[in-house]
Amino acid sequence: MTLSVALTHRAGTFALDAAFEAGPRVTALFGRSGAGKTTIVNAVAGLLHPDQAHITLNGRVFNDAATFTPPHKRRIGYVFQDARLFPHLSVAQNLDYAARFGAKAKARAQIIEMLGIGALLTRGPATLSGGEKQRVALGRALLSDPEVLLMDEPLAALDGPRKAEILPYLDRLKRDSGVPILYVSHAVDEVARLADYMVLLADGKVAREGPVFDVMADPAAVPLLGVREAGAVLRATVQAHGEDGISTLQVAGGTLSLMGVDAPVGTVVRLRVLAQDVLLSLDRPTGLSAQNILPVTITAIRTGDGPGAAIALDASGDTLLARVTARAVTAMGLVKGQQLFAILKATSVAQNAISGGVMSAPAPAP
Amino acid sequence: MSLDPAGWDALRLSLLVGVVATLIALPLAIWIAWLLARRDFWGKGALNAAVHLPLVLPPVVTGYLLLIAFGRTGPAGRFLESTFGLVLAFRWTGAVLAAIVMGFPLMVRAIRLAIEAVDPKIEDAARTLGAPGHAVFRTVTLPLILPGILAGGVMGFAKAIGEFGATITFVANIPGETQTLPSAIYALLQVPGGEDAAITLVLWACILALGAVVLSEWLARRVAKRIAGT
């Protein structure tokens, strides 16, 4: 699957000029409010007529100088921030709406099962909770048998617990549905958890793009992600769960002891390690309460306009990102290529940043 | 409450005019209301003004303008008679036209408000699910505006039954042909001793109007319940 997007659009003082390609699996379109994310997704869906555009999906031209395919002929599934269920139809009628117009979704029962909405079928949308509504909206979009699923901040309208309720379903969707997803978000944790590839938008332009592990570990992306939100994403294999609630995980550069990991032993999970939670030490520290110490090599140092500096670290193949003060860089004499130690606190991995199973190795080809 | 044959004729004619005018006007009113609510086009303001004109013009003026245009010698009247054999002036069909014109702004207003209350984002969602424009209207917009259509229909019907000024100017007051309830009441009040018969007709007019309101309230409540998605 290739979704190719290039467009320019002007609305008032806002100018959008962006081009990128989204491959199979999950592509995140990340940016702050007003960066142009929704404009792009609406242009892909055909709900917006951009000034200039070249948008193709698997070679089918949606929009160019001569063509504008209307939304109902694009075969895209769109999950909106507000679920937008049809209020006058039951959940089942909402789910089967696309079938009225010829959509032939193969796996209705599986989709309903996957999203856990089987018990809601006869209910009306007004009786559903926010999380339930969003799951039904997901099911409705999937049952339109789309070639690509567009998700515009599908969790933004939900509170913390509702978000946590939906995220596992998104993991399953990514793993089981096989439908490529363009996922719009301004939440770094969602992107770190779900995306394979990410496109970073700023002021209507693509500021950075690449595999999510690379972009998240790029010191230059720190100001775009926000200094408090920036942090590398690691692959880790769950090795053991201790009786004290601390789990042991294997990463390329060693083992980490972390709290609150509930994935089964043997699964590969993603860890998001916030840059501000990584400490650096020139010598291997002793007598420290923090348990997670990895030998690392500095691969890049980026000092910004402020008092902070972002430092990219290689940990035997994994990339970590640390944020220290520029003063510390000078005082410690940090330079590229230097070897030192990174210290991670066991609590430094946010619970919802751990997603079970989604990074497991692909099945061998038959 | 018993009616003399002339009273029955007036009642029957009023009902006929009301039903026919409502059935003809409603689809047109839905279309115009949708245009005004959802589309931008050149002349939208003029269309809006034209629709609402009968609401602000003296009914007698509207009736006289209808007579000029749709009378047997008027341009529209001549065309209808030569093309379809349809005569409006001084016929019950003319009373229907007067009722349509006078009731139309009320219908459009109610339906337009209902359409504007439907979130276009819901319609966008339907489009992404494969519904072409006309299907979006049929499967999403129309069911959601049903209460507004009912309200508009009842208002148009009530207006049609009660219309007096434009009707009497355009089609006069011919018993059995163009004499509707209001015209009959007016005629009875012009002759000495006609009050008793007039009171009976007044009561019937009240019953019809109240019945229409109660029926529409009941229907609207049922529809609203269904639309609320509970």
Image (cartoon, rainbow, N blue to C red):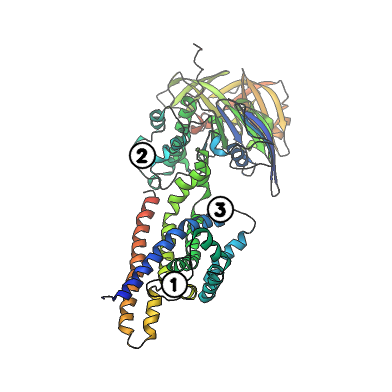
Tell me, for residue B163, which label it has, or none. Answer: 1
- B178 w.r.t. A195: above or below: below
At label 2, the amino acid type is Leu
> Disc 1 versus disc 3: distance between alpha carbons?
30 Å
- The residue that disc 3 covers is B38
Q: Are marks 3 and 2 on the same chain?
A: no
Q: Residue at the top extreme? A: A366
Q: Callout 1: residue from which chain? A: B
- A138 w.r.t. B22: above or below: above
**Residue B85 image offset from top left, x and y in percent:** 49, 61
| Quadrant, the N terminus of chain B | bottom left
The reply to whether the C-beta atoms of the residues labelled 2 and 1 are less than 8 Å apart is: no
Q: Callout 3: residue from which chain? A: B
> Disc 2 versus disc 1: distance between alpha carbons?
50 Å
Q: Earlier in the sequence, mark 1 or mark 3?
A: 3
- Of badges 2 and 1, nearer the viewer stands 1
Q: Callout 2: residue from which chain? A: A
Q: Is residue B84 visible?
A: yes
At label 1, the amino acid type is Glu
Tell me, for residue A120, which label it has, or none. Answer: 2
Q: Which quarter of the figure has residue A10?
A: top right
- Of badges 1 and 3, nearer the viewer stands 1
SS assignment at label 2: helix
**Residue A328 image offset from top left, x and y in percent:** 69, 32
Q: Residue at x 36, y 65 (%)?
A: B212
- B102 w.r.t. A251: above or below: below
Q: Residue at the left extreme? A: B2
**Residue A305 or A125: which is nearer the viewer?**
A125
**Residue B95 or A336: which is nearer the viewer?**
B95
**Residue A14 image offset from top left, x and y in percent:** 69, 46
